[in-house]
Amino acid sequence: MTGAGTRFDLLVRGGLVVDGTGRPARPADVGVSGGRLTVLPPGSSSGPGSGSSPGSAADAAEVLDARGRVVSPGFVDVHTHSDGVALLGPAGDGDRPGNGSGDGSGRELVRASVLQGVTTEICGNCGSSLFPALQERLAAMRAETRITFGGDVGAYADFAGFAAAHAGVPRANHLASLVGHGTLRAGVLGPVDRPARPAELRAMCALLDASLTQGAAGLSTGLIYTPGSYAGTAEVVALAEVAARHGKPYVTHLRDEMSRVEEALEEAVEISRRSGAALHVSHHKTAGRYAWGRTERTLPRLAELRAGGMDVTCDVYPYTAGSTALAAMLPPWANDGGLRALTARLGDPAQRDRMRRAIAEGVPGWENTVGNGGWDRISVACAPRHPRAEGATIADLAAAAGADPLDVAADLLVAEDGEVTIISHSMIEEDVRRVLAAPYAMIGSDGVPKPGGRPHPRWAGTFPRVLGRYVRELGLFGLEEAVHKMTGMAAARFGLTGRGVIRDGAHADLVVFDPAAVADRATFTEPLLPPTGVDAVVVGGAVVVRDGEETGARPGRVLAL
C-alpha cells in the first residue's frame, strides 16, 4: 500500500480512469514507478489542486494534470503493417521530405501511431512479415519485402533477427509481430503457384515453431495475396497446429471478403477446429457491391460459434475504404513467380488481355476486387515516380489518357517496379457500424505506413475516430466499451500480459485524452494530420507525447510474447 511521503517517477493526477476492463469509469490518480502502475484514491497525490501539501501524500518527479480528462491504458493496434517503417532510417525517411500535412514520408510516418495514443503495434499481419526465411533465400526476398514494406529493409531468418534489427532503432512505442504464412511460403518455396511438398511443409512448420518460441505473437495468413493464396486449407491447418501448441492465435485475412465471404469464413472456422488454434478474423468486412449487407449473416455466425465455445474474435477499422497493393487487383496467376515474372506478363499484350478477361469474368476462388466494384473505386495512394497520379482513380487516369484502365494499371506497375499502393472504396457504413458494435470486435488500423504518397488516413486517425465519431457523436457504444476494445480485449487476445489495463503492477502504458474533444483530423487528402484531444501518451513509464506533441523519449521495444 502507498503511504504518506511515497514518491513516484510520474503521477497522472485528477483524471477519470477507464481501466480497460469495461468496468465503469472512476476518479483516481495513477502513479508510475519503475515502469509499473499504482492506482491511488483521488486527491491522494500532492500538487496544485490535489488538496494535499507537498510531502503529506504521494508525489512525483513529474506530474501530468488530468483534470477533465480520461486516463486509459495505452491503445493496442492489433493490425498494422508497420514492420519495417522504423528500419528505413532514423525517422523513417522516404524519398520525399515530410511536411506534416500528409505526404506519407519522413518523420510523420513514425510518429502518427503514437500521436493517436497507440502504445503497442502488432505487425506481421495478412500473411506478410519480415521473417522468417531459410538462409539461402534471404537475398531473394529483398525485392518482395521492398514492395510490401516500402523500403529496403531486408528480411530476417527468425523473430530474434527481426527483434535485434529493431533494437538498434529507437522507437516511441512497442512492437509485437505475427509470423506471416506468405513469408514462410516465399522463404521456403519461393513465389510459386503449387502445393508445398511434405519436406517444404515441414520446413515451414520448423521456421514457424522457432519464431513462436522466440516470442512471435501468432500465425497470420493473407489468403487473397500471393503466395499465400496458392496454399490449400490443409497446408494452413498444419501451420495453425504449430501456433496452437504454443497457445497463440491463428489470425487471418480471409480468402475472400467479397461475394464469397461466408464461404471464406467457414474455411477459417475449419482451420481453427482442425488445428485447435484460436481464431482471429482480420479487419472483418463484407466488401464490394455483391457483399454489402452480409454482416447481417457473418456476425450472427461468429456469435453462434462463440456461444458454442469457439475462441473466435475479429478486428475492424472505422472506415469504408481499405488499402492494399495495386498488384492485388490482378488475378493470382499474374503474380506467379514473383515480381520479375509479373513485370514480364504486364509487358505482354496477350497477357494483359488475359488479365482483362479474368477481371471481367472472374476466376474460381479469387477475390476479384475490381470485378466487385470497378476501377472508379480504386485510387492511387503511392506511386513514388508518378506523384501526380496519387489521389486519382485508375478510371480517371484512364479517361484522361484515353486508355483502358487495365493498361493504365499495368503501365504504372511496370514503371514503378510493382511498388504501387492503392485505396479501395469498397464498403458501406452500415456494415462498418455493425462490426464495430460487435462485442467481440477489437480495433486495428490496418495501417500501411509506406514512405511517400497519400497513405490511408487510418494510420493517423483510427482510434480518435472511434472515440469521437462512433462513441461521442453517434453513441454506437459507450466509452468504457470502446476503451476495452482498444486495450484490455486486444491485450488478452494477443498475450500482452500486464498490458491493456490500469491496475496495480500493470505496465505503465497510458493515454490521457479529452472525451469532449478527441477526434481524428486525418483525411484522404491530408492523411497524416494528427488528432485533437489526445493530450498525453506514456510508454513504459516515460512520457512520449505531452500536449499533443512528441517529447523525443524513445522507450519502446519489440515485445517477445
Image (cartoon, rainbow, N blue to C red):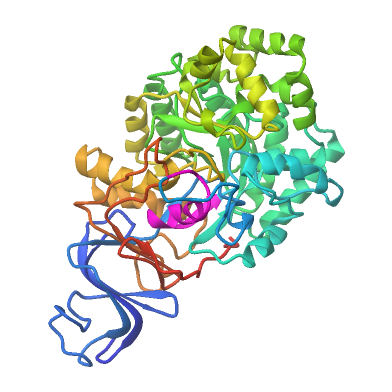
Q: Residue 327's x, y, as percent? A: 64, 27
Inspect the magenta stretch and tell me whether residue 210 lies in it.
no
Q: Residue 448's x, y, as percent? A: 53, 42
Asked which quadrant contains residue 543, the reply is: bottom left
Residue 155 visible? The answer is: yes
Residue at the image position 52 percent from the left and 66 percent from the top:
556
Residue at the image position 58 percent from the left and 34 percent from the top:
383
Q: Is residue 491 left or right of residue 4?
A: right
Residue at the image position 27 percent from the left and 85 percent from the top:
59
Q: Is residue 258 left or right of residue 513?
A: right
Q: Nearer the viewer, residue 88 or 479?
A: 88
Q: Which image quarter is the C terminus in?
A: bottom right
Q: Nearer the viewer, residue 391 or 45?
A: 391
Asked which quadrant contains residue 429, the reply is: top left
Q: Is residue 442 above or below residue 14?
A: above
Q: Nearer the viewer, residue 524 or 258?
A: 524
Residue 239 visible? The answer is: no
Q: Nearer the viewer, residue 100 or 129?
A: 100
Q: Residue 530's x, y, as percent? A: 36, 51
So how many labels did they put on this image? 0
Q: Residue 47's x, y, as percent? A: 20, 82
Inspect the magenta stretch and tell me whether residue 107 lies in it.
yes
Q: Is residue 436 left or right of residue 145?
A: left
Q: Is residue 447 above or below residue 293?
A: below
Residue at the image position 79 percent from the left and 23 percent from the top:
344
Q: Which image quarter is the N terminus in?
A: bottom left
Which stretch did the figure color magenta? 102-122
